[in-house]
Image: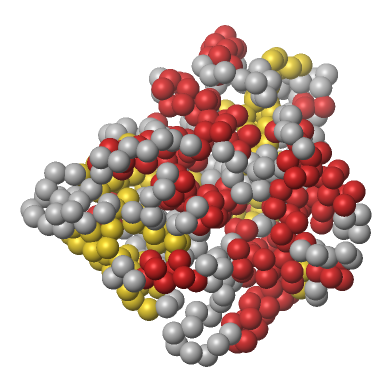
Amino acid sequence: MLVVGGGINGAGIARDLAGRGFSVVLAEASDFAAHTSSSSTKLIHGGLRYLEYYEFSLVRKALQEREVLLRSAPHIMWPLRFVMPHDAAMRPAWMIRIGLFLYDHLARREVLPGSTGVNLRQSPLGQPLKAQYSRGFVYSDGWVDDARLVLLNAMDARDKGASLHTRTTVVAARRHADHWIATLRGPQGEWRVRARALVNAAGPWAESFLREHAQAAGTEALATKSLRLVKGSHIVVKRVFQHDHAYIFQNPDKRIIFAIPYENEFTLIGTTDVELPADALAGFGKASINEQEIAYLCEQASRYFDKPVTPSDVLWTYAGVRPLLDDASGDPSAVTRDYLLETHAAGGAPLLSVWGGKITTFRKLAEDAADLVGDLLNERRPAWTEKAHLPGGDLSEWIGAPQRPDTDFERLLTALGQRHGWLPPALARRLARAYGGRVGRVLGGAEKLQDLGPEIAPGLHEAELRYLVREEWARSADDVLWRRSKLGLHYTEAQRAAVANWFQQLASDAPSSPSSPPFPPSFPDNNHMQRDRSWS
């Protein structure tokens, strides 16, 4: 199977297929989660606002997935409570109560508590807000480190035998009667792959990939759907409130924004919905926020917070492009976030294209996609991911039998402190959050802090960097500072430069042969990689 795209859907599909025993090659033109999948609002949620658009099926599907995901990786996902201040001018209280009742009961909950009302004048949750907001509602959803979620899926796919290649583009894919021949171009040159089926999970580039790079055997058009590219932008400011709940704010334009505790010291505010032209991401370009979006987010947050949020408060921004299936909605906010899996089987080797989707439903999307691929090949193999852990999500080595995903992490942190009391508490917590049950692989045989090697930047030692290069495809400072972690947000320019210098030194120390990659392979089984390359 050849999977095109290393965002959350591509990585999830590669993992699912590999776990069913299929032989899988994945090509990602940039880094894992380099675009949309690291630029979300970082929520595992049903999508409360989608109830207004009668998207009951989508909301139910997403609600069902919340606790499945929380159990699979409790180190990078955890429950989060949301506060909705009531603004009678936006929506009447009875409508919100009905919506929250549905939200609580459309899917089974075992971990997440239900919704409740709150007197904001008597609760710490109301302290950051303007006095006019006297009542509100509190409900549950979840938080996720989105970029690490993609990495964990990629790692699990690799652990199950898949061959994954970053910085590698599929420059051509030719469909034949019973196979595809694809030309891949990456750091090690150009090679060809013969595959029984092709999965197009290129996200915002899914449509353009089919039109520009995939060739049918006959006259059949492979690109039959259209995407709407909708940019969602976020701002990060110094921490606006001290408690651990998030806020959901209703805006006069009927949209909503979130204000979420972020990286301990900050508040994340987003998102926008700005439609982009179809060619906005030509050449794998990155989306960026504009001044109007910054002003919008500051203005809407300031409608609720007692202390206004201004553009001068913004410390960092990011933007991603959602590849939404064009359903002819006039308002970008109303475009469905559900996904469609389209298959082409008649007249040639199978093709499956992924249109749309959201991060919360990625596992179900991947499961459905793997089912379809099996059907197309007359090799339906059983699904397996619903009860499975992602890498690092199995904490049993540290804490024994799991109890609840929302408390198991704290038990892991306690066990880590007992085994490695020399770790500074802040570093121990960060490593536990990032690597979960695999944190021992990062620490190796270290018995004191100095055993982790030089401290390249505050709290970032050479042992961790080498682990990220060896195990997680890290090839640049940006990979580490903004996707494998968010340390870049905490560091000064000089500290970020120190990490970049480390990577430059690593590259300069690598073998000079043109046939040798500048970094060690992402997995130790070189024979496995050679076996894949020999398919040409």
Q: Is residue 475 above or below residue 33?
A: below
Relative to 59, 142 lies left or right: right
Residue at point 69% right, 15% down?
Answer: 116
Q: Position of residue 485 (x, y in %)?
A: 66, 57
* Closer to us: 363 or 121: 363
Q: Residue furthest left?
A: 219
Residue 180 in sight from this viewpoint: yes
Residue at point 44% right, 61% down?
Answer: 163
Q: Position of residue 179 (x, y in %)?
A: 21, 56
Relative to 226, 383 lies left or right: right
* Closer to us: 2 or 271: 2
Residue at point 33% right, 37% down?
Answer: 380
Q: Residue furthest bottom?
A: 512
Which quadrant does the C terminus fall into? bottom left
Relative to 42, 264 lies left or right: right
Q: Position of residue 229 (x, y in %)?
A: 37, 47
Residue 30 in sight from this viewpoint: no
Q: Position of residue 41 (x, y in %)?
A: 57, 42
Which quadrant does the N terminus fall into? bottom left
Coloring basis for residues: secondary structure
Residue at point 45% right, 57% down?
Answer: 162
Number of marks in the rendered image: 0
* Closer to us: 152 or 95: 152
